[in-house]
Image (tube, coloured by chain):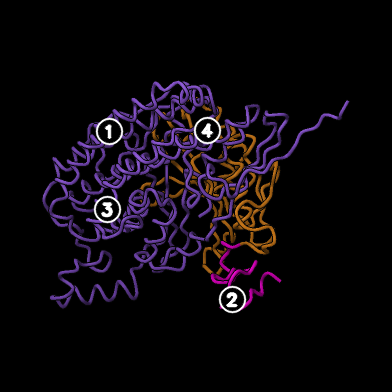
Chain colours: A orange, B purple
Amino acid sequence: MEEKVRNFLRTSFSDVIIREDDFRRQQSFYIKPEGLAPICAALLQNKELDVKFLADITSLDWLGHEEEKNGRFEVVYNLYSLSHHYRFFLKVRLPGDDPRVDTITHLWEGANWLEREIYDMMGIFFEGHPDMTKILTPDELEGFPLRKDFPLTWEQPQFSWNKDRPPEVIK
Amino acid sequence: MAEERTIELNMGPQHPSTHGVLRVVLELDGETIVKARPVIGYLHTGIEKTMESKLYHKALPATDRMDYLAPMSNNLGYCLAVEKLMDIDVPEKVKWARVCLAELTRVNSHLVWLGTHAIDLGAMSMLLYTFRERELVVDIYEACGGQRMMTSYIRIGGLAHELPKDFDKKVRTLVKIIKERLNDYEKLLTNNEIFINRTKGVAVISAEEAIDYSLSGPMLRGSGVKHDLRKANPYSGYENFDFEVAVGRNGDAYDRYLVRLKEIREALRIAEQAVDGMPEGPYRAHVPGVVLPPKEDVLYKMESMIFHFKIITEGFKAPFGAVYQAIESPKGEIGFYISSDGSNKPHRVRVRPPSFINLAALPRLVEGRLFSDVVCAIGSIDIVLGEVDR
């Protein structure tokens, strides 16, 4: 299965694949942001691979790490084949200012809330999403809590007290 | 003639049948739902952010507090993910004990679900019965880890303590009692006409849509998709156990009820097999510098004390990389995506929350249906708001 996924991506999408990684025997592909939606659409069409289940979407912030040179944000798409019991990852790197990537809600309904959560917590905008609004945090909260420059103990709609310094980055 | 229009009704956040602080904004045309919009986040406590600031060992207690009805499953998922990241292999005994505890957790979670779901639909006595039986499971938790809910008993590389001496006896008694009582539940509900009328053909979702919505657990299996991570990608030695995967057919609330009931039976079978075949051995892997040494050694052996002190104060450094480990929790696929930047704290811990993703399908389940079906739909999804909001 590992070989099949690699062949499929290498033959049809060689121009958007940056590199492949198999840390702890987990296959993952770093791809260019513009290649994401076409790859997902092609995967859904492919009967042989049968990758129909979008398990999860998550995001990472590499601020202050040497990995930041490849793009500060990383969005990870966790795809799973129900018939082959095989899981692999597509990873997209995005720049630090104004990170944007195309939505995949037109392919999977389940991506809707997952993308909204990432927008809310990490501030990555999904273009073409039908309802790009906050989902977990209060409406009056400014900034994105899971970014590395958001202080851990800073309460914005304040319920108790603030021990940390105010976040300069947000202003 | 008066102008025809829809009204907007606010259900929750303080409503007994929303199982916590879920708010659903409903647009009603008479009694039919035109649009449903779940509003969540009232219980958001930033657990993922908190875990980033803790050492790997110290981030563990945060996992109990997400799905507080299935603490052992969450512990297990996190520990397996860290063990995968650190490439640790745990002793056989630990694997078997973990399987046993994870299955007891499934019983615990499903019993609470059964009681609350039934009381939502008017069967008052079920709640009292299921909470009586759940007591047996939390008693075992208490004997193992000293806590009844936030156990943190499963640790990185093993367990927190040795299993209690009469563990197997306790589990066998529990299995015997609950097996009998399940028959009573079935008598009360399975052929109960009111219960059938409230659940059959309600909150239906087809197999294709269930996959489209990324549903998992009983929500997916209730629609007829035979997918169980315990069989598909066995972890912690599940390949050694003999059990069946419960699958529904119609994808309605009644089928999900049957699936969960069967899962309790299968979980009891697995728990029994686990105590029958429990091998002897240490309760923690021996990996100096990563896994905490056993407590009894810490008090008498110099090296153990040094390692204990170093792990508690400095932690261990994980290799650069990211791992994902998913397990089949009572709610569905709970996965931990742990990214490490090479330091002693996780760079990012992402939890794939089954309740959150299953709840996203709520509008699909209730739109076009009657208002009273919302209660049944929310109940049959089996959400825990602590995990939805994290």
Residue position marked by numbered label 4 in the rendering: B376
Question: Residue A62 placed where, x, y %?
Answer: 54, 63
Question: Residue B265 placed where, x, y %?
Answer: 28, 32
Q: Please identify the dominant SS of the magenta region.
A: loop
Residue B202 falls in which quadrant of the image?
A: top right
- Judge if badges 2 and 3 mark residues of a common chain: no
Q: Residues within 10 Å of mark 4 (few under 14, many from 20)?
A: many
How far, Cα to Cα, is label 2 from label 4? 41 Å
- Judge if badges 4 and 1 mark residues of a common chain: yes
Point out the frontmost of discs 2 and 1. Answer: 1
Determine the chain carrying the residue at label 4. B
Q: Is residue A78 visible?
A: no
Q: Which residues are magenta?
A: A145-171
Q: Camera-side residue: A25 or A79?
A: A79
Residue B258 falls in which quadrant of the image?
A: top left
Point out the frontmost of discs 1 and 3. Answer: 1
Residue position marked by numbered label 2 in the rendering: A162
SS at mark 4 in the image: helix
Answer with left or right where residue A74 lies relative to residue A129: left
- Judge if badges 4 and 3 mark residues of a common chain: yes
How far, Cα to Cα, is label 1 from label 3? 20 Å
Going from N to C along the chain, the mark reached first, 4 or 1, is 1
Residue position marked by numbered label 1 in the rendering: B181
